Image (cartoon, rainbow, N blue to C red):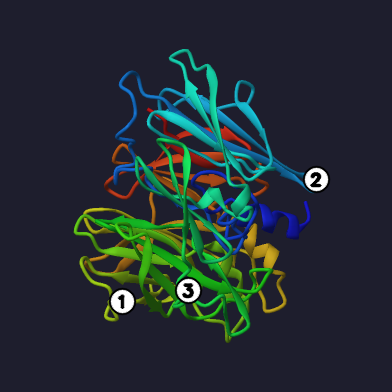
Amino acid sequence: MKNTTMARVLAAATTLLVSGLAACESSEITNPPPVGGDPGTNPPTNNPDGTDPGASAGKPLYAIESMIFDDTGQTTYIALVDSLETQPTVTLDKAREFAGYAAADASGGKLIVGDGEKPQLTRFAIGEDGSWTQEQTLSFSNFASASLTASVFVNPTKAYAPFDGTNHVVWDPQEFTLVGPMTAPASIPLTREGLAVSRGYGHVIVGNYVYQPYYWSNENYTKYTETSQVAMIDTTKDEVVAAVDVPCPHLHIASQDEEGNTYFSNGQGSVAAAVLGADHPKNCLARIKAGETALDTTFTKKFRDLTEGREGNNFIYLRDGIGFFNVYHAERDNVTPSTEPSVIDYSANYHLWTLDLKTMQAKMMEGIDYAGGQYVAFKIDDRTFIAIPAGDYSSTAVYEILPSGVAEKRFDVQAWMFHMFRVR
């Protein structure tokens, strides 16, 4: 596969919440995401623990999304499983197939799947026997550039789908209807230093506010501005009420701790730029403290200062003051200034590290080996899972990150598994 094709696929696949309607781009799939983006954590559907309060009772049901892509395009597969415990490889032989990049999510115990070829969403009821029943289709034809892959589910009756850079359209997942557009904030420019704005994959909902990161990059995701922004969307007014400047490139991933502090970091796409460009902004981790609307300037940390000079990405808070992130070990690839960015983008020499936020001491995570850099994290039922692809994206290994910060293998999935969530 050509590097540009892969970059577009990964870029689009990094924003993943309700399916990608008209392709945008955002880092590992954000609008969609570019390799410059990342799939990052899967934002919870409605509750902080990743469960859906509208889901029906009964035995648990989980959905796993995988993608197969090549120079001609991509195909999405959705497999249903009743457990996330250790099990044999999850295959695609019984999975439902969708053309293109068709990210999905759950609301009210039902599956909502985007269309990889049309600006629309389709809702399905899933029977106890795993059967699919198509119910309704919601068209976004008046907002044809909407990236439903990046929808923010505010509550069971409200979601925001981004379109045209910094605009949003409000829709109702329960009634399955459009509500109307949300005006774009003038405080978030469409261009900065000649680079274009992209919406970060991760977001966090805190009370009545959505914290949504934005960053600026070139079209190939090989150059980023040092300044990113975090927009605060008031969900009672459906408008952006503040935008906070953050001195970190490619702000793409967001997660929150027990006290309500929110952490932001870059995705994988900016690792190559920081490694190869001596003057390129270095990647970092930032924080907005609970109840505040300004950046905690005492906290911002460059990953290279935590990892003996290595670049990091995709910081995810775990619990009890512990978080984790991915680190690129350039020494294993013998990187020089003339190394092609694709070597770093698709290297198998990334390793997860844990970070103690009390001491700011980082170390390599136990229970896991070196792997690809584009991992995706999911919070499901108060548990944390990560999906790490093989170097050629032919398979994906799924691990659970225990509260101790140790990784335990749960299962493999065929192809590139980019999304996993509870249906009911």
* Residue 195 percent across, percent down from the top left: 61, 78
Lateral position of residue 239 relative to residue 31, left or right: left
Binning the other alpha carbons within 10 Å of mark 3 as few (below 14), some (14 to 19) or many (20 upward) gives many
**Taking 194 as reference, is 13 above or below it?**
above
Location of mark 1 (residue) = 295
Q: Secondary structure at mark 1?
A: loop
Mark 2 and mark 1: span between their CA atoms? 43 Å
* Residue 351 percent across, percent down from the top left: 49, 56
Q: Quadrant of the C terminus?
A: top left
Q: Secondary structure at mark 3?
A: loop
Location of mark 3 (residue) = 283
Check whether the beta carbons of the residues at disc 3 and disc 1 lie within 8 A of each other.
no
Q: Would residue 145 be visible to someone looking at this image?
A: yes
Q: Secondary structure at mark 2?
A: loop
**Foreground: 240 or 379?**
240
Binning the other alpha carbons within 10 Å of mark 2 as few (below 14), some (14 to 19) or many (20 upward) gives few
Mark 3 and mark 1: span between their CA atoms? 16 Å
Mark 2 belongs to which amino acid? Thr
